[in-house]
Image (spheres, rainbow, N blue to C red):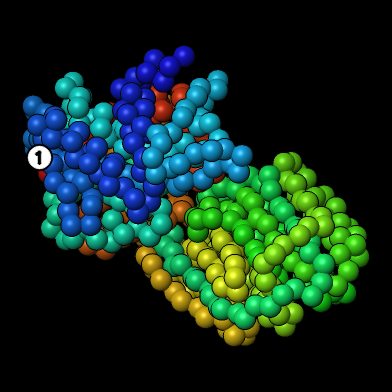
């Protein structure tokens, strides 16, 4: 079955068109032009602001002119992750999709349903001629996944809407009214290199689930960088380790699925034997959540230089000492992760070390407490630490008028109460709200699984439910 035959056809048609356009974070030129052309072809007022956000305005349908105006908002960029055995260029190719039962998936890459389904839904509202709605401003932001620079660059006064509907959550029974803020923690250092004195060993970790570093951080998934760190730390007991290279993880907002370390040790056979014992323990630890985990430890060769034993020890101890995972649960909201960190990317090449982290929290003070813990560990090892890209959380307003309306519609429509929640992901609502403090905001969306990983998939019946829910919301927006 082709995607164009799935209901609601209008959404899957627009999602297919969108997914034919390359749209990596920070390289959104093609998708900005695509959305701009889409709005102009409809004859709607379309503008692109100085950072690249696209705003398309559509007048209210007849009889809806006196209702509160709405901002429909989604982000244009997508997380670009692929399996190692997949040949794919995210900058030039469109996503290759397939249907698997009730799910739409991509072939070995991220699907881009985060947040492409939100974008496609807004496109569908804009081009519709039979859906009642108040005056609309469609806001398509850029670079949500790697810095939220689109939302940060959105200036006061560009929007006039009174209610913002963000279409960027991943459980169709949730109404999201709050989110975590975040800060990037980058650790760097340069080391002198020399010819390795020992025998070369290659350690590879692969087959992990990965996933969203906010929404999935509490699920106990394996982090390839942390597992590499454990294996290297074990070797320090009886070996003089020289690190040649490390290549683990990728984007800050994705839990690392794969990693490789090339090292030099005094006795490769002894190291492999000891590491293999730990390998068995790690596989047993993760058996229930990481059935695909593979750890390969083997003799190897390398013509590259290594950093010294002393510097290698500093790097290994730092990697072992960095906090990864949940830092604090919220004392105020049941089952909500308040603060966490993802050790997202570890790269050592030619003596240049980079460790990229994404620290999140719904409370600013605990966000920086977590980040400062990382900084303390790294500075003890004489490494450089920079905080950047900080963005605020979104404080819940559970009693707002739009939340009450959506709760009522959902309950009557689906015969159950929705979950009104705050999430541990970074949504743009907090940033936009800083410039538009009077704007009511809520976030919701269709069910998506495995976001930020090649296992990402979007649920077809959920998209139908979401589309029906959104249309009813737009029809029941209150008067000004």
Residue identifier under label 1? 45
Q: Is residue 252 left or right of residue 405?
A: right
| Residue at 27% over, 35% down | 122
As drawn, 52 above or below 378: above
| Residue at 57% over, 38% down | 86
In the rendered image, which quarter is residue 394 located in?
bottom left
Q: Is residue 301 left or right of residue 364?
A: right
Residue 66 image offset from top left, x and y in percent = 8, 37
Q: Choose between 446 and 155: the one closer to the eye.
A: 155
Residue 421 image offset from top left, x and y in percent = 45, 49
Residue 228 image offset from top left, x and y in percent = 71, 61
Q: Is residue 118 left or right of residue 291?
A: left
Check disc 1: other Cα within 10 Å, few if <14, some if 14-19, many if 20+. some
Q: Choose between 461 and 79: the one closer to the eye.
A: 79
| Residue at 50% over, 55% down | 251
Kind of element beneath mark 1: strand
As drawn, 319 above or below 275: below
């Amino acid at each position: 079955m082709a995607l164009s035959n799935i209901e609601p056809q209008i959404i899957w048609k627009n999602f297919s068109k969108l997914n034919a356009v390359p749209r990596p974070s920070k390289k959104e030129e093609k998708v900005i032009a695509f959305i701009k052309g889409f709005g102009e072809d409809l004859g709607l007022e379309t503008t692109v602001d100085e950072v690249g956000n696209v705003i398309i305005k559509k007048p209210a349908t007849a009889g809806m002119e006196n209702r509160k105006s709405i901002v429909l908002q989604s982000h244009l960029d997508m997380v670009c992750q692929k399996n190692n055995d997949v040949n794919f260029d995210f900058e030039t190719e469109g996503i290759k999709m397939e249907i698997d039962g009730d799910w739409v998936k991509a072939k070995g890459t991220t699907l881009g349903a985060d947040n492409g389904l939100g974008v496609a839904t807004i496109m569908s509202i804009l081009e519709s001629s039979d859906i009642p709605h108040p005056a609309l401003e469609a806001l398509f932001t850029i670079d949500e996944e790697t810095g939220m620079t689109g939302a940060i660059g959105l200036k006061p006064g560009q929007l006039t809407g009174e209610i913002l509907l963000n279409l960027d959550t991943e459980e169709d029974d949730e109404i999201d009214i709050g989110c975590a803020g975040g800060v990037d923690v980058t650790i760097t250092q340069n080391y002198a290199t020399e010819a390795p004195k020992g025998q070369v060993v290659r350690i590879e970790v692969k087959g992990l689930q990965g996933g969203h570093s906010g929404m999935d951080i509490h699920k106990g998934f394996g982090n390839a960088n942390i597992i590499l760190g454990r294996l290297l730390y074990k070797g320090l007991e009886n070996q003089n380790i020289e690190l040649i290279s490390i290549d683990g993880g990728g984007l800050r907002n994705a839990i690392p699925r794969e990693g490789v370390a090339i090292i030099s040790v005094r006795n490769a056979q002894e190291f492999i034997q000891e590491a293999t014992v730990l390998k068995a323990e790690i596989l047993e630890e993760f058996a229930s959540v990481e059935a695909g985990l593979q750890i390969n430890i083997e003799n190897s060769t390398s013509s590259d230089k290594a950093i010294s034993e002393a510097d290698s020890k500093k790097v290994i101890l730092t990697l072992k000492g960095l906090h990864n995972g949940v830092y604090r649960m919220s004392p105020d909201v049941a089952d909500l992760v308040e603060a966490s960190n993802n050790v997202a990317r570890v790269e050592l090449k030619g003596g240049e070390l980079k460790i990229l982290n994404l620290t999140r929290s719904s409370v600013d003070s605990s966000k920086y407490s977590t980040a400062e813990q990382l900084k303390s560990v790294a500075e003890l090892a004489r490494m450089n630490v920079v905080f950047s890209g900080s963005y605020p959380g979104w404080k819940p307003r559970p009693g707002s008028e739009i939340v009450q309306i959506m709760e009522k519609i959902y309950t009557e429509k689906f015969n159950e109460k929705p979950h009104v929640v705050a999430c541990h992901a970074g949504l743009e609502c907090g940033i936009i709200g800083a410039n538009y403090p009077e704007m009511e905001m809520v976030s919701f969306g269709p069910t998506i699984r495995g976001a930020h990983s090649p296992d990402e998939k979007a649920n077809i019946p959920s998209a139908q439910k979401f589309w029906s829910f959104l249309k009813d919301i737009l029809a029941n927006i209150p008067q000004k």
